[in-house]
Amino acid sequence: MREKDLSEDEQIAIFGSLRRAVQKWQVRATIHGSVRTVKAAGADGVHLMAGRNPVAARAQLGSGALIGLSVHHPHEIERLPRDVLDYVIAGPVHETESKPGYGPALGAAGIAVMAASDNLPVIAIGGITPERASDVIAAGATGIAVMGAVMRSATPGREIARLLEALAGCKVGQNQ
């Protein structure tokens, strides 16, 4: 869950609703933000912004927590403490309406470099559409993360269905 503009209390309340909504699928749910909020909400882990300390998060949350980190350049992945991270979210893959000028855009080639450099799962984000999903999966991404395309859609459920249909037709990258 990523709601960084809300107060901690509001994030905890929304996370409780999210947890109840996905409970039947037995998924693990994390919060993008602080370890303190993760602990207060009872989340399964934390997703950290680029530059945050995953070693400290692991020490505070323990070995069973999911720890993820945002990365924006292929060289960043070389310096990561691989023994404490469970995944990275890499992007933006393409220029986005949500964060114009945030980048540079990695493209499928940048995702391929990141996926080949380590055994960490790489989740691609930024400008991902159903038409672009197969390119990043073929490049080695383990999965995709999408926000803007779904939030801007007049029919978000249909957009999610289109993304899932696109992923169902993908072959997972060679590194996965």
Image (spheres, grey):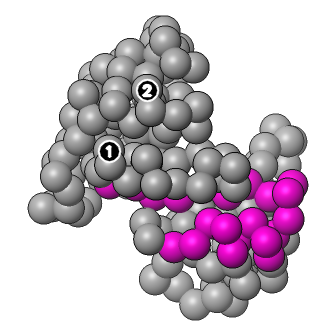
Answer whether residue 61 is magenta in the image: yes
Residue 8, given in percent of the width and then of the height, sits at: 64, 88
- Mark 1–mark 2 Cα distance, whole angstroms, equals 10 Å
Q: Left or right? Give the position of 153 relative to 17.
A: left
Which residue is more in the foreground, 73 or 141? 73
Which residue is more in the foreground, 144 or 149? 144
Residue 119, given in percent of the width and then of the height, sits at: 58, 31
Which residue bears the numbered disc 2?
Answer: 116
Comes first in the chain, label 1 or label 2: 1
Q: Quadrant of the N terminus?
A: bottom right
Q: Residue furthest left?
A: 101
Answer whether residue 125 is magenta in the image: no
Residue 51 to residue 101: above or below: below
Residue 100, given in percent of the width and then of the height, sits at: 15, 61
**CB contact under 8 Å: marks 1 and 2:** no
Residue 135, given in percent of the width and then of the height, sits at: 31, 20
* Whether residue 160 is visible: no
Q: Left or right? Give the position of 82 relative to 97.
A: right
Task: Check disc 2 and report its element: helix, strand or loop.
Answer: helix
What amino acid type is highlighted by mark number 1?
Pro
Q: Which mark is residue 141?
A: none
Which residue bears the numbered disc 1?
Answer: 74
What amino acid type is highlighted by mark number 2?
Ala
**In the rendered structure, which segment of residues is drawn in magenta?**
52-72
